[in-house]
């Protein structure tokens, strides 16, 4: 069914997006994109504006990740687009369906030197699934719908369209088709059967579940597969929380022991990248389950690698009725290792030191965070500790920057999370270095009544760089920040609230005040600069 719509290019673009559930757009003002604002203003699409374009795209990405639908950012021509590039790249690495609509200098006098005249398409072509210029007003709806369908088709990712000034400001009347549904990627059933047989026969199997399990709507199927095959589950990214903490097959602290002892490692919905030792799990055979053929690993050859709709593949695994090994002893051994590791942590989480150890911050947060709190990490060592010590209580409650590792996601992700969930706790964990990339957007949160609790681990250094450089060279440079800097005062000056904490005993009450405040509130925790997160590798 189609319906005629008339209006300027902005009207037509938003009308085309209507069927995809998009209710908000993130932006920073620029004349080239006024028609999008005009359309949003008249149709009730919520407009949230920011102080740096990267925040707009990160916020749209958070919505996309959390809601499992497209997130929308509108960027003005030229610098508006180039300021968004790191965030678009992050969305590309994360497979997040972010739709970026941008302004563009007028095409009728292209080449004459209009303000901000640059061809964005080649700049973003390698970091999007589709990038193009819309050259006629009556083509706006069709091109927007095709782009969104591409963004949503696994493996998902950002798409980019720019609209010359004369195209977007001009009127047209167009029939707008029903939204194009994303294509379903059918898995090869033989490969699924091969994977199932390998997993069924395994004596010591392990599952590692990643973000695509959540974004692909396969959380329940993962749980069914794990329960039916009795396989312990570890998680990274948004895979965290897919099995709730406390589930008999949910593990986190014993991953090293699990990989060392496993005979089959099943990696689902996440690449075999540096976070997973590039898919090298020693003696274990690898089954890599991905949501699209484009995600098949090329640097290693897994024993089986089904590619396609994750829910369908996991449901097939859950229904496997072939030969099976018993894993009871394996699961019990890992539980023993898990409990032992947790026992060792207890002292760290309660550490009563001066200066405060980062682990203590997490000991306090574990007490105060609700099971459905959205936890966002942006920083180095401080956030690595969060990954270790905080356990999302439900799926879709954990936002990290993903494998692109871009600092500066924090304020945008927090904004997107608050817009998505008006009533949940939103907790942003920021390194003091990371804070510098986006803290000005605390003003955007204040002005638009978007309360967020920001906890800064303030060690006065770029910790994740300073410690390794010192280890490598015996000295370090370009790794110091001002110790004790009052990031809390910055947020107060921007209209929010905050306080500094330097003693462990003051942490709990400060966090409580922050969550009770109902405004953007920064708890500036002075942490021990000598504390380095124990990690085995950094760069390669
Ligand atoms: C945009 C960007 N620039 C630089 C880096 C390199 N980098 C990774 S971690 C890190 C240090 C982070 O310091 P901070 O946020 O203070 O956290 P800490 O390690 O001190 O806890 C840096 C500079 C990066 N990942 N992203
Ligand atoms: Mg730091």
Image (cartoon, rainbow, N blue to C red):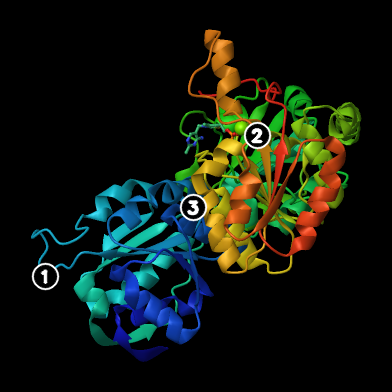
Kindly report the distance in space between the C-alpha atoms of the residues bearing marks 3 and 1. 36 Å
Which mark, by number, is residue 507?
none
Note whether ligand 2 is within 8 Å of mark 2.
no
Q: Is residue 54 visible?
A: yes
Q: Residue at x 76, y 55 (%)?
A: 514
Q: Is residue 22 visible?
A: no
Which comes sooner in the sequence, label 3 or label 1?
Answer: 1
x, y percent for residue 455? 69, 46
Which mark, by number, is residue 484?
2
Kindly report the distance in space between the C-alpha atoms of the residues bearing marks 3 and 2. 43 Å
x, y percent for residue 253? 80, 32
Nearest to the eye among marks 3 and 2: give it: 2
x, y percent for residue 158? 43, 56
Q: Which residue is mark 1?
A: 108
Which residue is at the front of the view, 33 or 342?
33
Q: Considering the numbered disc 1 on the image, is that residue within a helix, a strand or a loop?
A: loop
Toward which corner of the image does residue 29 lie, by quadrant? Answer: bottom left
Query: Would you say the residues marked 3 and 1 are in contact, meaning their CB atoms lie under 8 Å apart?
Result: no
Nearest to the eye among marks 2 and 1: give it: 2
Nearest to the eye among marks 3 and 1: give it: 1
Toward which corner of the image does residue 354 lie, by quadrant? Answer: top right
Q: Residues within 10 Å of mark 2 (few under 14, many from 20)?
A: some
Q: Residue at x 80, y 49 (%)?
A: 510
199 sits to left or right of 288: right
- Toward the top, the furthest residue is 474
Q: Which residue is mark 3?
A: 155
């Amino acid at each position: 069914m189609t319906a005629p719509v008339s209006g300027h290019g902005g009207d037509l673009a938003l009308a085309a997006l209507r069927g995809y559930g998009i209710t908000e757009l993130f932006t920073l003002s620029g004349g080239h994109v006024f028609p999008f604002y005009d359309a949003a203003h008249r149709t009730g699409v919520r407009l949230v504006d920011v102080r740096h374009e990267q925040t707009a795209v990160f916020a749209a990405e958070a919505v996309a990740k959390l809601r499992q639908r497209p997130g929308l950012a509108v960027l003005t021509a030229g610098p508006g687009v180039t300021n968004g590039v790191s965030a678009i790249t992050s969305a590309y690495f994360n497979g997040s369906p972010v739709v970026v609509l941008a302004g563009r200098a007028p095409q009728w006098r292209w080449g004459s030197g209009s303000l901000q005249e640059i061809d964005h398409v080649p700049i973003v072509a390698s970091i999007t699934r589709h990038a193009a210029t819309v050259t006629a007003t009556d083509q706006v709806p069709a091109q927007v719908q095709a782009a969104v369908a591409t963004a949503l088709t696994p493996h998902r990712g950002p798409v980019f369209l720019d609209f010359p000034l004369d195209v977007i400001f001009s009127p047209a009347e167009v029939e707008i088709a029903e939204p194009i549904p994303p294509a379903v990627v059918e898995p090869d059933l033989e490969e699924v059967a091969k994977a199932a047989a390998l997993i069924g026969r395994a004596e010591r199997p392990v599952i590692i579940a990643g973000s695509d399990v959540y974004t692909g709507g396969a959380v329940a199927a993962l749980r069914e597969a794990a329960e039916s095959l009795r396989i312990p589950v570890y998680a990274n990214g948004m895979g965290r929380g897919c099995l709730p903490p406390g589930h008999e097959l949910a593990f986190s602290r014993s991953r090293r022991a699990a990989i060392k002892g496993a005979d089959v490692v099943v990696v689902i919905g996440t690449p075999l990248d540096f976070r997973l030792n590039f898919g090298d799990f020693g003696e274990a055979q690898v089954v890599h389950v991905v949501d699209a053929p484009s995600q098949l690993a090329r640097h290693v050859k897994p024993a089986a690698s089904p590619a396609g709709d994750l829910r369908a593949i996991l449901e097939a695994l859950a229904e496997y009725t072939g030969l099976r090994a018993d894993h009871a002893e394996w699961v019990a051994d890992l539980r023993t290792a898990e409990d032992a590791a947790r026992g060792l942590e207890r002292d760290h989480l309660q550490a009563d030191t001066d200066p405060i150890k980062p682990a203590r911050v997490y000991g306090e947060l574990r007490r105060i965070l609700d099971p459905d709190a959205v936890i966002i990490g942006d920083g180095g060592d401080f956030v690595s500790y969060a990954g270790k010590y905080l356990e999302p209580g439900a799926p879709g409650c954990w936002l990290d920057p993903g494998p692109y590792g871009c600092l500066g996601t924090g304020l945008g992700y927090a904004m997107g999370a608050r817009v998505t969930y008006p009533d949940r706790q939103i907790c942003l964990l920021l390194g003091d270095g990371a804070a510098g990339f986006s803290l000005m957007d605390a003003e955007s949160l204040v002005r638009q009544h978007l309360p967020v609790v920001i906890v800064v681990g303030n060690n006065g250094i770029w910790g994740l760089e300073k410690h390794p450089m010192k280890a490598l060279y015996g000295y370090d440079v370009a790794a110091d920040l001002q110790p004790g800097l009052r990031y809390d005062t910055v947020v107060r000056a921007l209209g929010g609230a905050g306080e500094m904490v330097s003693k462990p005993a003051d942490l709990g009450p400060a966090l409580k005040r922050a969550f009770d405040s109902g405004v953007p509130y920064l708890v500036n925790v002075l942490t021990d600069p000598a504390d380095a997160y124990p990690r085995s590798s950094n760069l390669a």
